[in-house]
Image: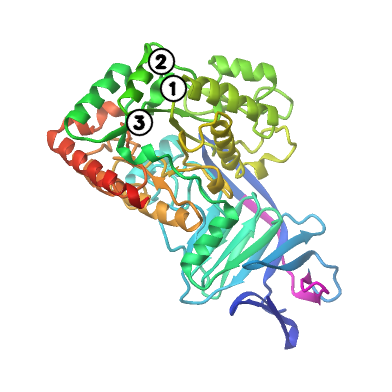
Amino acid sequence: MNWQTEAGGKLVLRVAGRTLFEHAPDTPAVFVGRGVEKIDMYRGNFDINNYVEERVALREARFTLLHDGSARIELARDAQAAAELTIHAIQSAHGVHLALSATGEINRVWWRVPAQRDEHVWGCGEQMSYFDLRGRNFPLWTSEPGVGRDKSTHLTWQADTTSKSGGDYYNTNYPQPSFVSSQKYCLHAQTTAYADFDFRHPEWHELQFWAIPERLEFIVADDFVTLVERISQRFGRQPALPAWVMDGAILGLKNGREHAQTIMQQSRAAGIKVSGLWCEDWVGIRQTSFGKRLFWDWRWNETRYPGHAEWMKQLNAEGVRFLGYVNPYLCNDGTLYVEAKAAGYLATRADGGDYLVDFGEFDCGVVDFTNPAAARWFEERVIRDEMLNQGLDGWMADFGEYLPTDVTLANGIDAKLMHNAWPTLWAEVNARAIQGAGRTGDAVFFMRAGYTGVQAHCPLLWAGDQSVDFTRHDGLQTVICGALSSGLLGNAYHHSDIGGYTSLFGNTRTPELFQRWAEMAAFTPMMRTHEGNRPDDNFQFWQDAGVLAHFARMTRVFVALKPYV
């Protein structure tokens, strides 16, 4: 950590030859102010508006080198003004930490990081449209990614006009206020507040925060391999996958036991290597205008899966694992909702009343994971008792992006600050449930939502709900971009729904799409199919002998690559 004070009030921080902070009165690095936000959510899609009441440059920097080698920088509007933001710079093992504190009523910070004109930038969580982030800005707020995600397309327009769900290039289930520079450093902001990382200016990157970050962390290295290793150490090394995951494809089927058994037998007869069945409808189906959704009361549906206990034993004897589905919400017409409400485990309105979230023609309560008793109840009562102890070896741990910003939580923290934190809390609940049941390294879950720290708890990401097509911003290729961007931030294991998921407005899956997707999936850590939100309208792999044979060949490639994962 090398600080330099130069003529004219210029202050520069260099670490291992990289300029990470550069301030001068006429080109200040930091601006502060106040703003008022308006955040509206409709089924996981957010309309976010920001009215900036004040934005002021902090032109005066008062630098003090402390006896322990750290430094204090007090930033003020001018030489006569009191300091409004204080930086405490501390040397870290692989870079520097800048701890921040503020006075007054500041709730907006704009921070400029020196940039090079030819610099490239990656990261910011799981970005689906652009791997290199330079030239664009990226709001960082966990949400539904949207359908189409391209304002120039008819599909996106249809989604926007019918359900406010078209999305844009920056919408993601998994944002993270961290980026990797081609200068071989990573910057991470320790905050859960709404942020916007703007990489459009040739001379600086401007990072906007809607609360004072606890600190900014710079991690540096001499090469990218070492840098990613250090990033992984910082956020937590991703848990290893169970070996059985790579013994074959996991077939996604959701039409009851008889259908699942029939397709599994047909697949194996065609030479497809099968390691598991993923039947998300284990809890039952709720039919909506969007398609076949699930009944969010996390218990076996005996009508669709009669004799499930014996069937689990039969599958396991054949070397086939069974996976299901769960999310952190409880439908208000289910039994677990009644149980959780009676125990006081649900988040509430400000007046203490029930807070129900619209998930698309049905309403749900939010289990309050800031209440340790509620989190423990979900781990033990739901995941352990209803899932692990009932034969499930894995599940999709869906959602985590829908925490309303006006909900009241047990920990008393503003929901606007807890919103981005929710995916990591959800990952912790799943990981603790598996650990508590003694199934670590054997049971597996996968998530689409994420934020800082999810890496240490979630063993496997999935790329969310791609459209069933090849489109630039919502189709097959977004999986590759998402895997690369999240991988740089320590998420080693990533996969997707083979063939995509979302089928709306006449957009349906083709045999060719399934084949191309399977070819890509063979080179990922999990190979898993999905029937989609409208199975009856979309091509399924067992409907064509040629596709069956192709899929069998791809599963053999997948299994052959197991030693390399």
State how far apart marks 2 and 1 are (Cα): 7 Å
Left or right of 347? Residue 323 is left
Q: Which mark is residue 533?
A: 3
State how far apart marks 3 and 1 are (Cα): 25 Å
Specify start and end residues of the magenta stretch as a single range.
50-74
Magenta stretch prevailing secondary structure = strand
Comparing 141 with 482, the one in front is 482
Q: Residue at x 44, y 20 (%)?
A: 283
Q: Residue 391 carries which label?
A: 1
Residue type at the position of mark 3: Asn
Within-10-Å neighbours for mark 1: few <14, some 14–19, many 20+: many
Residue type at the position of mark 2: Ala
State how far apart marks 2 and 3 are (Cα): 27 Å
Left or right of 20? Residue 199 is left
Reading the image, the residue beneath label 2 is 309
Q: Is residue 61 magenta?
A: yes
